[in-house]
Amino acid sequence: MTKTGRTIVIGDVHGCADELDALLKECTVESGDDVVLVGDLVAKGPASRDVLARVRAEGFRSVRGNHDAHVLRWKAAHDAGEVEPRLSPTHAELAQSLDERDWALLRSLPLYLRLPEHQALVVHAGLVPHVPLEQQQPVLLMNLRSIRPDGTGSKKPDDGMLWGALWTGPELVLFGHHASAGLQVYPHAIGLDTGCVYGGKLSACILPERKIVSVPARRAYAPITRESAT
């Protein structure tokens, strides 16, 4: 096959393996395409291990999401013989089911990825404007939603303006995490969490043209609430 040189950035999968396969088909992924995921590969959906297996087999790249981090914290405490952080029943079931290959993949996920050929970055939740990338707080890279009036970042959606609306670049940032906001398209930021696991869609942005491609969820796998739509 002729290499196309495209980069396909995919929103929060949350264990929705069937929808991931459908989206890859809809994007006509070919040899030479670079597939990058915005994190939250696992949890809430029905087939987290299938998603991890697909990422491994195809050599896809991903950043670390907050739900990936939740189960990693549990694993670290478990292996150290320490008190394990409390997990929801579904997250606990997931953590017990993962094998060492799965844990190795989750541990390998960076907090951000650079796409220099597109002058772009991929991060799970967002970036605080005017803070150098290396000085961004890891917790906000995985949980940011809004910017307070004083310029600090918040996990909450209503502490100020959505961070993407304030991001002036020069890099394009592709992110997920904020399902309740839906598709977010700004001049220098594109939010791709369109709530697949809640019965919405799984979405991708194809670079360099910034084309948005989506497929519908087969069903709702988890209830969406103000707290859970992250």
Image (spheres, rainbow, N blue to C red):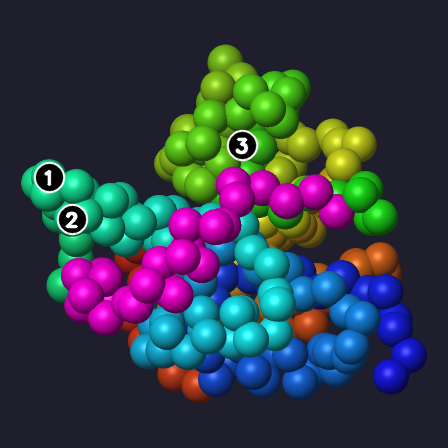
Mark 1 and mark 2 in contact? Answer it, CB < 8 Å: yes
Residue designated by label 3: 161
Residue designated by label 1: 82
Would residue 65 be found to the left or right of residue 173 on screen? left
Residue designated by label 2: 78
Helix, strand or loop for the magenta stretch, by majority: helix
Looking at the image, residue 163 lies above or below residue 180: above
How far apart are labels 1 and 2 at the CA level? 6 Å
Q: Nearer the viewer, residue 132 or 211?
A: 132
Would residue 114 be found to the left or right of residue 72 on screen? right
Mark 1: which secondary structure?
loop
* Residue 102 in sight from this viewpoint: yes
Corner quadrant of residue 114: top right
Corner quadrant of residue 103: bottom left
Question: Label 1 neighbourhood size at 10 Å, few (<14), some (14-19), many (20+)?
Answer: few
List the single residue furthest toward the right: 2
**Marks 1 and 3, the one that precedes in the sequence:** 1
Q: Residue at x 40, y 33 (%)?
A: 139
Type of the residue with mark 1: Glu
* Position in image of residue 73 (x %, y %): 26, 44
* Residue 199 in sight from this viewpoint: no
Mark 3: which secondary structure?
strand
Mark 2: which secondary structure?
helix
Looking at the image, residue 22 lies above or below residue 5: below
